[in-house]
Amino acid sequence: MAAERDEPQIEDWWKQLCAELGVAAPADPAAILDLAATAAHQVVRPAAPLTTFLVGYAAGLAGGGEQAVQRAHSTAQALAERDS
């Protein structure tokens, strides 16, 4: 229930942050939050922000764009699930 109430606020924050950073984000915020949840619950809670940061960093180093984000996201998701 709380997630449903937070959804408009998250969407607004996502759009505002993207605008301020000057980026057109190639990922759905829900997918990022799902990855953070997996890392938090399967590894340890502090892994959530570290995981999402590193996915973005790795994607940027790989040239950015949707495919780079998807590759980094898939790698992190698989690792977090494997560590459970």
Image (cartoon, rainbow, N blue to C red):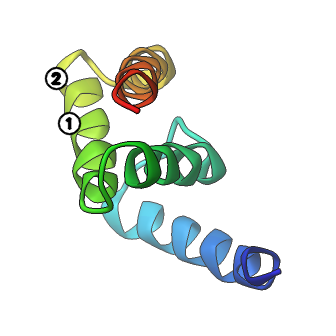
Residue that appears at 49% across and 43% down: 35
Q: Where residue 58 sits: x, y (%)?
A: 21, 27
Quote the CA–CA distance across marks 2 and 1: 6 Å
Query: Tags 2 and 1 in contact by the CB under 8 Å rule?
Result: yes
- Position of residue 65 relative to residue 37, above or below, is above
Q: Which residue is mark 1?
A: 57
Residue that appears at 23% across and 15% down: 62
Residue that appears at 42% across and 23% down: 65
Q: Name the side, left or right, on which 69 lies relative to 32.
A: left
Q: Amino acid at mark 1?
A: Tyr
- Position of residue 14 relative to residue 42, above or below, is below
Q: Badge 1 local density, few (<14 within 10 Å), some, or many (20+)? A: some
Q: Where is the N terminus found, in terms of image quarters? A: bottom right
Q: Nearer the viewer, residue 67 or 3?
A: 3
- Name the element at disc 2: helix
Q: Badge 2 local density, few (<14 within 10 Å), some, or many (20+)? A: few
Q: Where residue 43 sits: x, y (%)?
A: 32, 44
Q: Amino acid at mark 2?
A: Leu
Q: Where is the C terminus found, in terms of image quarters? A: top left
How many numbered discs sit on the rendered protein? 2
- Name the element at disc 1: helix
Q: Which residue is mark 2?
A: 61
Q: Nearer the viewer, residue 11 or 82?
A: 82
Circle on res. 65 = none
Q: Name the side, left or right, on which 54 lies relative to 29.
A: left
